[in-house]
Amino acid sequence: MLDGLSLLIRGDPGLRLAGEAGAAEEALHLFAVEKPDVTLMDLDLLGGEGIRAIRQIRQVDPEARIIGLYLRRLDISVDEAMWAGAWGCIAKDCLDRELIAAVKAAARSGQ
């Protein structure tokens, strides 16, 4: 999934990919170094790591804009992500333009 997201983001001239992480600890480190406008977080990381990472990022930066990526809407992880401080959540199988629109909306919300 990371490869597809990377290509999608790199293909939009209005976006810049700050980095990629395969685990929560990597995501936390990248966030601290890069300070991205928007963070995409996989809610399906093993052991609830995606939710934990959202909480930790929001503790460091209460204004962080994080979009959770989920597989199934009925999954409780969407609710948990919102409680943890996610700006929003979007399905992994959404249309490319929907994901790009969500990222840009989250970025605008911080301006």
Image (tube, rainbow, N blue to C red):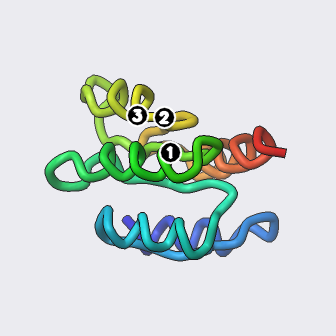
Residue at which label 3 appears = 84
Q: Residue at x 33, y 29 (%)?
A: 80
Q: Are marks 1 and 2 in contact (CB under 8 Å)?
A: yes
Q: Are marks 3 and 2 in contact (CB under 8 Å)?
A: yes
Q: From the viewer's perspective, is 45 left or right of 111?
A: left
Residue at which label 2 appears = 85
Vertical relation: 7 (above or below) 101: below
Label placed on residue 22: none
Badge 1: residue crowd in 10 Å (few <14, some 14–19, many ≥20): some
Separation of disc 3 and disc 1 at Cα? 8 Å
Q: Quadrant of residue 111?
A: top right
Residue 84 in sight from this viewpoint: yes
Residue at which label 1 appears = 58
Name the residue nearer the viewer: 9 or 43.
43
Count of numbered labels shown in the rendering: 3
Separation of disc 1 and disc 2 at Cα? 7 Å
Type of the residue with mark 3: Ala
Vertical relation: 33 (above or below) 58: below
Q: Earlier in the sequence, mark 3 or mark 1?
A: 1
Q: Are marks 3 and 1 in contact (CB under 8 Å)?
A: yes
Q: Earlier in the sequence, mark 1 or mark 2?
A: 1
Q: Residue at x 58, y 50 (%)?
A: 61
Q: Residue at x 36, y 72 (%)?
A: 26
Tag 1, which secondary structure? helix
Type of the residue with mark 2: Gly
The image position of residue 24, as x and y in percent, is 32, 62
The image position of residue 34, as x and y in percent, is 61, 73
Name the residue nearer the viewer: 106 or 94.
106
Tag 2, which secondary structure? loop
